[in-house]
Image (cartoon, helix red, strand yellow):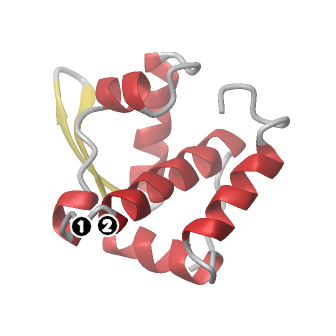
Amino acid sequence: MDTNLTRDADALICLLYKHYCLKKKDGMSKAQAKMFGSSVDIQQNIIPNMSHADVDETCKELGRAGLLDNLYADDIAYVVILSDSAVVYMENRFKNGLDSVLDYLSKIKGLIPFI
């Protein structure tokens, strides 16, 4: 998959994949682990240093790229689901799984102020 993403979108998909991996590690089913609630939930629980408007727009960007399946209500991403394509993309990108994702996130932390 040749995916061009903004830095914000790249950081967010990595954070969502990290949480997906952690949920699976804790015994959650794949289907449940891919579900993230709304963009409001993501902003509050995963990336609180980013504004809700920016989280919502970034979820929309990731949806257009085929990495998130978003359901909309009240003009926001009301249900955000990591797509199967996203899981495949991230598995191929981070061959060592969670450890690779955590290492990458620590490296970009200085470049992305909201991480």
Residue ID at (33%, 74%): 84
Q: In this view, does 105 lie to the left or right of 24?
A: right
Q: Mark 2 points at which residue?
A: 24
| Image location of residue 48, percent across then percent down | 50, 21
Give above or below for 72 relative to 64.
Answer: above
Q: In this view, does 40 lie to the left or right of 99?
A: left
Q: Which of 20 and 71 is in front in this view?
A: 20
Q: In this view, does 88 lie to the left or right of 68?
A: right
Give above or below for 76 relative to 9.
Answer: above
| Image location of residue 90, percent across then percent down | 54, 72
| Image location of residue 47, percent across then percent down | 51, 29
Q: Can residue 65 be seen in this view?
A: yes
Badge 2: residue crowd in 10 Å (few <14, some 14–19, many ≥20)? some
Using the numbered discs, state the Cα–Cα distance from disc 1 to disc 2 in whole angstroms. Answer: 5 Å
Give above or below for 92 relative to 35.
Answer: below
Residue 66 in which image quadrant: bottom left
Q: Are marks 1 and 2 in contact (CB under 8 Å)?
A: yes
Q: Which of 62 and 32 is in front in this view?
A: 32
Q: Which of 56 and 92 is in front in this view?
A: 92
Q: Which of the image's four quarters has the N terminus?
A: bottom right
Q: Name the residue under label 1.
A: 27
Q: Is mark 1 on a helix, strand or loop?
A: loop
Amino acid type, callout 2: Lys
Q: Which of the image's four quarters has the C terminus?
A: top right
Residue 24 in which image quadrant: bottom left
| Image location of residue 108, percent across then percent down | 79, 46
Q: What element carries label 2?
A: helix
Give above or below for 49 relative to 89.
Answer: above
Amino acid type, callout 1: Gly
Residue ID at (71%, 44%): 7
Residue ID at (47%, 29%): 55
